[in-house]
Each structure stands twice: as C-alpha cells, then as structure tokens.
Amino acid sequence: MVFETIQKLLVQCLGCSENRIQEHTAMLEDLEATEEDLAEVLMGLEEEFDVQFPENATQTLRTVGDLVSWIENHG
C-alpha cells in the first residue's frame, strides 16, 4: 500500500510511467526529478500518511525504497 501510494504520487508529480518506479529507483537520477519535485512529493506524502519529514529529507531519502521504509517506520 505504501509503495503503491508513492508510485501513484510520483507518476502524478513527475509525469513518468508507472513501470519506471521500483523500490530501488533513485528519484533524482533515475526519474530525473528536481529537488522541487521531490519536495512536492514529500508534501503529498505528509498529507496522505499524516507524517512529518525532517528538513533534510530531500538529501537523505534518495530512492523509492527509502521513502517506503521511512513511512513504514514513522507512520
């Protein structure tokens, strides 16, 4: 459920194909997201999962799997 929600949000924000998004996918490098794109994704996830990411989240949460793990451990 967490992965699917992240995947859906990334498709929505970045306009990329769903099949490009896997747990190991690096959002900045593989999906060519900008820091601003990633911040938008994190804001959407904060609303969806009622969590608050740390200030440095865009530097530390680099892959889709990183996001899944963080949400599962803090949500």
Image (tube, rainbow, N blue to C red):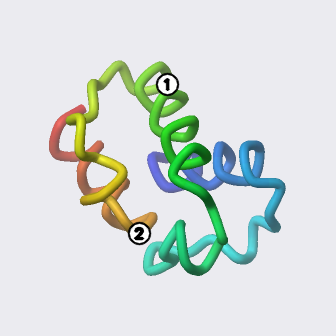
Q: Residue furthest left?
A: 73
Q: Nearer the viewer, residue 24 or 36?
A: 36
Q: What is the x, y in percent for residue 69?
A: 26, 57
Which residue is rendered at x = 48% and y = 75% of the image? 26
Tag 1 residue: 48
Residue 57 located left or right of residue 46:
left
Image position of 68 with respect to 20: above or below: above
**Circles 2, 1 touching at the beta carbon (< 8 Å):** no
Q: What is the x, y in percent for residue 15?
A: 83, 55
**Amino acid at pointer 1:** Glu
Residue 6 located left or right of residue 58:
right
Q: Nearer the viewer, residue 12 or 2?
A: 12
Kindly report the distance in space between the C-alpha atoms of the residues bearing marks 2 and 1.
19 Å
Which residue is rendered at x = 36% and y = 51% of the image? 58
Q: Secondary structure at mark 2?
A: loop
Which residue is rendered at x = 59% and y = 57% of the image? 34
- How many numbered marks are there? 2
Q: Would you call the spot at circle 1 few (<14 residues within 10 Å), some (14-19), or many (20 or more)? A: few
Residue 11 located left or right of residue 55:
right
Residue 7 location, quadrant:
bottom right
Residue 12 located left or right of residue 68:
right
Q: Which mark is residue 63?
A: 2
Q: Secondary structure at mark 1?
A: helix
Q: Nearer the viewer, mark 2 or mark 1?
A: 2
Residue 68 location, quadrant:
bottom left
Q: What is the x, y in percent for residue 27?
A: 53, 67
Image position of 1 with respect to 74: above or below: below
